Image: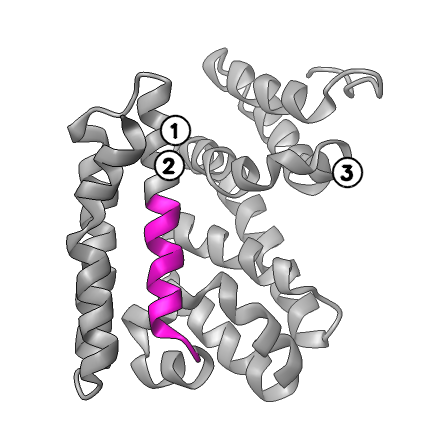
Amino acid sequence: MSQEPTPWKDAAKLAFDDAKRLFRDGDYAGALERHEWFHDHALEFNPGYYGVRLSFALSHWKELADVYPPAMTALVRIRDRDCLRLLSGAGSPELIHDVASMDRCLGQGDATLELFRKVETAHPELAKESFRFIDSLVLHRDAALFCRYCSDPVGFYRDERELFLRLAVSLRECGRGDPERLLPMREELRQVASRLAEVYVDDSEVTARIARLETSIDEELTRRAS
């Protein structure tokens, strides 16, 4: 098992690199230890790992869990621990993002929605502050709940659109923006627009503005990439 990262190094990167290397080497217990450390401590060393921690790191953890059951047990244990913190009122809005990301990794989006409803009942202010981290999930699973919390559906879609555009441009700049890589992300954004059109079918102004934003994406991407 690798030693604890030293403070004067990028401890977060070292831990994540260790986890991947140990997995490749077949040291599954060591890889799990590094994943747990990275998840619980990475942001203390480098806040820039916020996104990596909830995406690539969890994906690697799930890959480990698929062949090493203790890793699955640990992932579920941490998810459940964070759920209890949220239900007690001790958690932060970001913590529901953690839980939602773990649920997504586990294919348990319904569990996130159930948790949010419980938080909404017990701690309404925390639910209000947390909604922005699960708004896309709620949109697709509970339209009434989405409408209750989302006061600006056009702004919501505009933000989703902007995230896609920035990521697409970034991938192209580093030579990874081929159409096949972008296609799933583009389709996901198209589904968001379609779902919003269904939810707000009685509001022609909202649906028209979202439609204009949707149809102009490819043109905007070309403009930004030129």
The boundaries of the magenta stretch are 151-164
x, y percent for residue 139: 33, 71
Secondary structure of residue under mark 2: helix
Q: Which residue is mark 1?
A: 170
- Residue 6 left/right relative to 88: right
Q: Is residue 2 magenta?
A: no
Total of numbered circles in the picture? 3
Principal SS element in the magenta part?
Answer: helix
Point out the frontmost of discs 1 and 3.
1
x, y percent for residue 202: 18, 88
- Residue 65 left/right relative to 70: left
| Residue 44 badge | 3
Tell me the distance, in whole angstroms, between the alpha carbons under discs 2 and 1.
Answer: 5 Å
Task: Judge the density around disc 2: few (<14), some (14-19), many (≥20) Cα neighbours within 10 Å.
Answer: some
Q: Which residue is mark 2?
A: 167
Q: Earlier in the sequence, mark 1 or mark 3?
A: 3
